[in-house]
Image: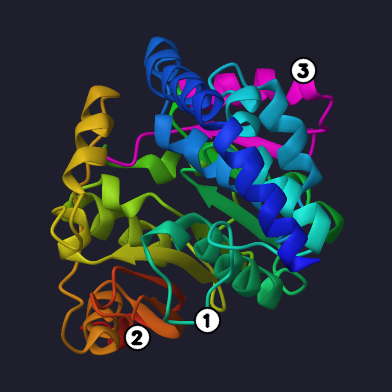
């Protein structure tokens, strides 16, 4: 079946080349131009597109993301199908994926696996804590759907924090998709501005309850001061046993020096009003660097996934778990 699937894939892929180009144009138009017109992040769309791809190819069950994905005005489902239909046909025939999307071995991830592998690592960490927490706070939630799927059955109070326009679009799209959001409190904040915690507190957050903070795909768009301030706010206003799940990116990635061809996507990002900011030097002892950084803001590093550690170019990002530590132990 693999040979038959390959032959059919090659034939269909050649036929679909003009359509794939059209699909790419549709995606860029929706993701960059329409997002900018709406005043929302184009990279947030890229993440939910990745979740759509993972679901379609059987790598991660996420029907809620599929529903929300269809309802968003700044993405193109048709464009994605025009690009991925030949690969999907091959997958349906032989039951396997080749090239992209695939799940690589741990620490052998490349840049093409950023969204897919990162999502699965965060899922593992969320599952580790979801039955022992009382609150869940998603920082820079974008179009993430874990509050409406993975955590909905846990009966925890969920908060989503993001910029106001992004939240307005998400709330409207959730309603259009028929997704129940009654258990989620939406709090409009900007992490580049101080005192965002006050808005979270006013929305009903209880600092005495054990909380899981998810901060996925956000730190690289902030400066170091904003990242440190946010981690400090979390540590100061969370109960013992609370946990922070976040990703930290290599300075070489943020500066576009990690691999050839990285400058071009950054040009597209700037066109949508976004750019990278904060990264750490992870080319040496990355775990030690991350340990010191988190400890300096009152957090103890726990499980860590060093993406790309066993590749030629080395680590480009880390997905990590950190818990709060007593004030007297802070560096």
Query: In front: 6, or 60?
Result: 6
The answer for how far apart the CA atoms under marks 1 and 2 are is 10 Å
Q: Residue at horizontal 20%, vertical 61%?
A: 259
Q: Secondary structure at mark 3?
A: helix
**Whether residue 217 is visible:** yes
Picture quarter with the N terminus: bottom right
Say which mark, if any, is on residue 310: 2
**Whether residue 56 is visible:** no
First of labels 2, 3 by sequence position: 3
Picture coordinates of residue 246, whole percent (x, y)? 43, 64
Q: Secondary structure at mark 2?
A: loop
Cβ–Cβ under 8 Å for marks 1 and 2: yes
Neighbour tally class for label 3: few under 14, some 14-19, many 20 plus, Cα within 10 Å: some
Q: Residue at horizontal 74%, vertical 37%?
A: 66
Region in magenta = 165-192
The answer for how far apart the CA atoms under marks 1 and 3 are is 38 Å
Q: Is residue 260 left or right of residue 161?
A: left
Neighbour tally class for label 2: few under 14, some 14-19, many 20 plus, Cα within 10 Å: some
């Amino acid at each position: 079946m693999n040979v038959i699937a390959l032959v059919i894939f090659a034939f269909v892929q050649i036929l679909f080349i003009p359509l794939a180009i059209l699909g790419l144009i549709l995606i860029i138009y929706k993701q960059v131009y329409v997002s900018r017109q709406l005043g929302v992040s184009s990279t947030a769309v890229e993440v939910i597109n990745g979740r759509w791809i993972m679901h379609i190819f059987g790598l991660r069950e996420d029907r809620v993301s599929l529903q929300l994905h269809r309802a968003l005005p700044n993405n193109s489902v048709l464009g994605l199908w025009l690009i991925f239909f030949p690969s999907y046909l091959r997958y349906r025939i032989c039951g396997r994926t080749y090239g992209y999307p695939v799940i690589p071995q741990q620490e052998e991830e490349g840049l093409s696996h950023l969204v897919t592998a990162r999502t699965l690592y965060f899922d593992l960490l969320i599952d580790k804590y979801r039955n022992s927490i009382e609150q869940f706070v998603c920082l820079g939630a974008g179009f993430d759907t874990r509050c409406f799927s993975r955590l909905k059955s846990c009966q925890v109070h969920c908060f989503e924090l993001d910029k106001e326009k992004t939240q307005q679009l998400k709330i409207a799209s959730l309603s259009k998709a028929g997704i129940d959001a009654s258990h989620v409190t939406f709090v409009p904040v900007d992490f580049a501005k101080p005192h965002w915690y006050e808005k979270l507190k006013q929305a009903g957050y209880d600092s005495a309850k054990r909380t899981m903070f998810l901060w996925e795909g956000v730190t690289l768009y902030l400066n170091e001061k904003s990242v440190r301030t946010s981690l400090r706010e979390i540590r100061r206003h969370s109960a013992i046993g609370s946990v922070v799940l976040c990703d930290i990116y290599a300075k070489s990635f943020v500066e576009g020096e990690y691999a050839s061809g990285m400058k071009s996507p950054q040009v597209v990002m700037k066109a949508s009003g976004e750019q990278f900011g904060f990264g750490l030097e992870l080319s040496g002892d990355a775990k030690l660097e991350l340990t010191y950084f988190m400890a300096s803001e009152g957090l103890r590093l726990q499980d860590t996934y060093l993406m790309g550690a066993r590749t030629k170019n080395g680590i480009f990002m880390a997905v990590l778990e950190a818990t709060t530590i007593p004030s007297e132990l802070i560096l």
